[in-house]
């Protein structure tokens, strides 16, 4: 029997975020590299989000170097750097997608975003 790994959870989280945004009318493009600055580039109307997805059983974290890298990448694409936190569903604030909660934050000012 295969063991479900953190890597699998992280990749699944990217698909959860992409599916949610797609349902909200966004066009989605996945990064070709697992080590890229943004896991997903999403566009809708004149907006572009460069999204780094983190998944955790509790509160995910993003390293300061990852934030700098994401901000540089978003700036080069004339987009907004976005941090997407994906956690197993629980009673709380956020967007519930099946068994997951999604929280979206602008890395420019840490304000919560709505798709």
Image: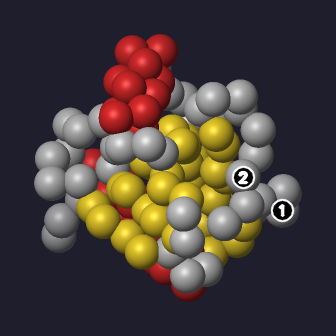
> Residue 55 vs residue 102: left or right?
left
Could you tell me which secondary element the residue under label 2 belongs to? loop
Q: CA distance from mark 1 to mark 2?
A: 19 Å
Instruction: Identify the residue at image location x=54%, y=29%.
Output: 61
Which mark is in front, 1 or 2? 2
Instruction: Identify the residue at image location x=76%, y=46%.
Output: 112
Mark sitting on residue 113? 2
Instruction: Identify the residue at image location x=47%, y=45%.
Output: 79
Badge 2: residue crowd in 10 Å (few <14, some 14–19, many ≥20): few
* Residue under pointer 1: 91
> Residue 67 vs residue 30: left or right?
right
Quarter occupied by the N terminus? bottom left
> Residue 115 vs residue 53: left or right?
right
**In the rendered image of this protein, does residue 22 appear above or below residue 111?**
below
Quadrant in which residue 88 is drawn: bottom right
Q: Which sits in the foreground, 86 or 48? A: 48
Quarter occupied by the C terminus? bottom right
Q: Which sits in the foreground, 88 or 68? A: 68
Residue 71 in the image, given as x and y percentages of width and height = 45, 28
Q: Which sits in the foreground, 46 or 27? A: 46
Extreme residue in the right direction: 92
Residue 78 in the image, given as x and y percentages of width and height = 44, 43
Q: Which sits in the foreground, 17 or 86? A: 17
Mark sitting on residue 80? none
Q: Is residue 23 visible?
A: yes
Pointer 1 with pointer 2, Cβ within 8 A: no
> Residue 58 vs residue 33: left or right?
right
**In the rendered image of this protein, does residue 26 appear above or below residue 14?**
below
Quadrant in which residue 13 is drawn: bottom left
């Amino acid at each position: 029997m295969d063991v479900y790994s953190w890597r699998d959870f992280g990749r699944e989280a990217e698909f959860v975020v992409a599916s949610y945004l797609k349902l909200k009318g966004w066009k989605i493009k996945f990064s070709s590299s697992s080590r890229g600055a943004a896991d997903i580039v999403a566009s809708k109307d004149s907006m572009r989000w460069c999204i780094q997805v983190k998944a955790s059983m509790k509160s995910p974290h993003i390293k300061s170097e990852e934030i700098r890298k994401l901000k540089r990448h978003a700036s080069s694409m004339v987009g907004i750097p976005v941090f997407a936190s994906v956690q197993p569903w629980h009673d709380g604030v956020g967007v519930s997608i099946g068994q997951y909660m999604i929280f979206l934050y602008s890395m420019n000012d840490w304000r919560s975003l709505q798709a």
